[in-house]
Amino acid sequence: MTGTRGLVNYYPGNENEYIQVNEGSYSGHWYAWAKLYNSGSNSSDTVALIWKYTPNGGLYQCGNRSGDSGWALDYTAGVRDTQSSRVQAKFKTGDGSVEYGPAVAWR
């Protein structure tokens, strides 16, 4: 799953900006999170991770790690393997335009 990315080329001179779903394990559980790369001076661009909750099929959004925002400036909180098997990175520009990266499923 790591390496699934979507380019977000909104600003001239910042054509390398992209969002990506990453993965890793911690304390015996597998996690996925979204990260915004190469945002440069566009500090108002944000990233989120949307995910489908396995037990009830509901859609949710992870933002920053403190949980006080649905968006993050760098990378999102992680979703554990027991909660979801489908995730997608989401990007919002400073002017409020929203784009979606590739969806990822595992298991």
Image: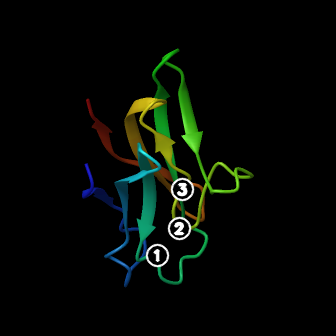
Q: Is residue 95 above or below residue 85?
A: below
In front of the other: 68 or 28: 28
Farthest residue in the top direction? 56
- Residue that mark 1 sits on: 39
| Gap in angstroms between the C-alphas marked 3 and 2 | 7 Å
User: Is mark 2 in CB contact (under 8 Å) with mark 1?
Assistant: yes
- Residue that mark 3 sits on: 76
- Compared across the picture, whether 37 is left or right of 96 comes to left
The local secondary structure at tag 2 comes to loop
**Quick one: label 1, few (<14), some, or many (20+) residues within 10 Å?**
many
| Gap in angstroms between the C-alphas marked 2 and 1 | 8 Å
| Gap in angstroms between the C-alphas marked 3 and 1 | 15 Å
The local secondary structure at tag 3 comes to loop
- Compared across the picture, whether 10 is left or right of 63 comes to left
What is the number of the mark on residue 74? 2
Q: Where, quadrant-wise, is the C terminus in this rendering?
A: top left
- Compared across the picture, whether 101 is left or right of 69 comes to left
Which residue is pictured at 63% across the width and 56% down the height? 65
Q: Is residue 59 above or below residue 102?
A: above
- List x then y, in percent, for residue 106: 27, 34
**Quick one: label 3, few (<14), some, or many (20+) residues within 10 Å?**
many
Q: Which of labels 2 and 1 is toward the front?
A: 2
Farthest residue in the right direction? 68
Q: Earlier in the sequence, mark 2 or mark 1?
A: 1
Which residue is pictured at 37% across the width and 85% down the height? 13
Residue kind at label 3, given as amino acid type: Thr
Residue kind at label 1, given as amino acid type: Ser
Residue kind at label 2, given as amino acid type: Asp
Which residue is pictured at 44% across the width and 55% down the height? 34
The quadrant where residue 3 appears: bottom left
